[in-house]
Amino acid sequence: MKPMNDLTLEQKVGQLLMCGFHGQHADEQITRLIRDYHVGGVIYFRRNVESVDQLTRLSAELQDMAAEAGALPLMISVDQEGGMVARIDKEGMTQVPGNMALGATGNPEYTLACARILGRELKSIGIDMNLAPVVDVNNNPLNPVIGVRSYGEHAESVAAHGAAAITGYQLQGVAATAKHFPGHGDTAVDSHLGMVTVPHDRNRLEQMELLPFRRAIEAGVDAIMTAHVMFPSIEPEPIPATLSHKVLTGLLREEMGFEGIIITDCLEMHAISKPYGVAEAAVRAVEAGADLILVSHTLQDQVAALEAIVEAVRTGRISEEVIHQAVERIMTWKRKRCGQQNDHLVSPKASETVEATDVEPDDCTESTDPSESNESTLFKIASSSITIVHNDGLLPLDPEKDVYVIWPEVVQRTEVDEPWSHTESLGIALSQLRGRVREHIITTQPTYDEADRILADVMDSEQVIVCTYTSAGHLPKGQQYLVEKLNKNHPLIVIALRNPYDLLEISRPGSYVCTYENTPAVVRALSHVLTGGLQPTGSLPVRLR
């Protein structure tokens, strides 16, 4: 690896950028960024993934390109949070549970086991950084962007699960990234779309939002990602944390003692790009104390950010010493993680953050056939996460009566809602355990006419299950209408496939069950719960008030 003094200013600034591109091979965009602009970081999205083998070859291709250009090894990252946010959804990548499902188990050892599984798999395909875990405390039922990406609403629980995930990833040589600092959980606006404010005083922030980040730092987390959220009790100026020197340097670096990499959330998100523009925001983020600038999509914005930072140094707006310190942190990380095999261990303090319970991680993740062991582990976790909120005698299902299932198919992909390409519906899973199952598949945004047709079709059914799915802050109106109409005429079983807060927007059904996601392991476990073959042990990690 080149010494710092051998790098030009442009090469140093290139190390501060992490960029996405649009191909499944080294296309013109990423080739230009690596060869001409010395970009040091790459982020993968689903658009880059055809298969696990293809992605492995792509990682090697990009690293070879950087080496041929005389550059430092690339920092290759991905958002593989688990649950409903997972960029790699192909065979060969385990579908680990999402955070709220893990929070519902009450067992951080499950979180540790899942992070070890995922960390090992990511490392094997050339990915050295996972932009996870989310350690935001989700205490706002209307939060449209965090929700089930959080472990729950209790700061201590979030902190324990977050530390476990950090330990698991970094035991496998993959950097963990705690996000979104100082906390995005108590918001009702998606920062992809606009500016957000968390108005609480400093005492409340210490007890709630900041606690999981302090625990992440104690666990030795490699990176922390910023939030495009305003915190007036920390930064009185109306600027988001990503661009605030008081937040990133004053609070995170100096007060909390974080010595790792500070990475911004994507600067193309509207909370940043609309009021500031990506180029100006990149300069402000570096001034604030960020080491790594994330620009995920557009070549024009990526080049503009690079050139703006270089110009800011040349004009004296940013001192070269600031750039030097950021690059030194990045180079230290690359020496530690990039391109190495799975022989890295985190510091002892990280492994001490999770107390052993009834599950040993090695028992969960190691066997002669890892895929078979992983499947068993995921089923066990799913069984421990499924939560029966209440049951008025409708469960388990009566085997002598027919069953009608209404299943919402998730087809729309967003930044925080990525349906797995290989899933199965509840009707299919139930039919494998018992006969006489009818299923009607709807969209997550059904029309009233579509709902009325279902109401007519379901009229004579003896047992009715309606599954709800909310990826934003509110249950879609068509789903609300369908549930309310069914609830008037049937002893109704409602299963919240993602957002447990759906209960707040419907009348109380006969039975209410939360699964926090609709991944295959959860659907299979759910079918056993409904038929009485499995007793779930999940507890709500949020209050339904």
Image: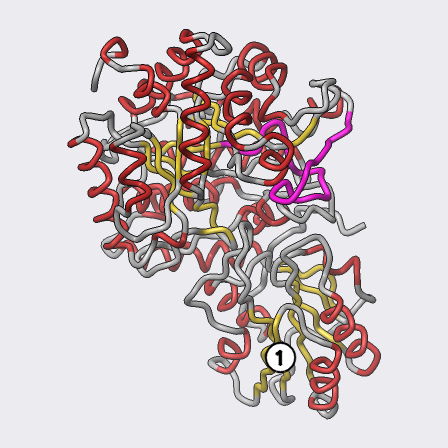
Q: As displayed, is residue 428 above or below residue 412?
A: below
Q: Residue furthest bottom?
A: 460
Residue 333 on image: x %, y %? 34, 22
Q: Is residue 450 left or right of residue 325?
A: right
Residue 249 on image: x %, y %? 56, 14
Residue 322 on image: x %, y %? 44, 10
Q: Amino acid at mark 1?
A: Val
Q: As displayed, is residue 176 above or below residue 409?
A: above
Segment tinted magenta in the rendering: 178-200
- Residue 172 visible in rendering: no
Q: Is residue 368 left or right of residue 167?
A: left
What residue is shown at x 53% (from left), y 78% (from top)?
430
Magenta stretch holds residue 182: yes
Q: Dominant secondary structure of the magenta stretch?
A: loop
* Mark 1 residue crowding within 10 angstroms, few (<14) / some (14–19) / many (20+): many
What residue is shown at x 54% (from left), y 55% (from top)?
414
- Foreground residue among 149 and 314: 314
- Assign the N terminus to one quadrant of the image: top left
- Where on the picture, by quarter, is residue 370? bottom left
Q: Which residue is mark 1?
A: 405
What residue is shown at x 50% (from left), y 82% (from top)?
431
Magenta stretch holds residue 443: no
Q: As displayed, is residue 504 above or below residue 17?
A: below
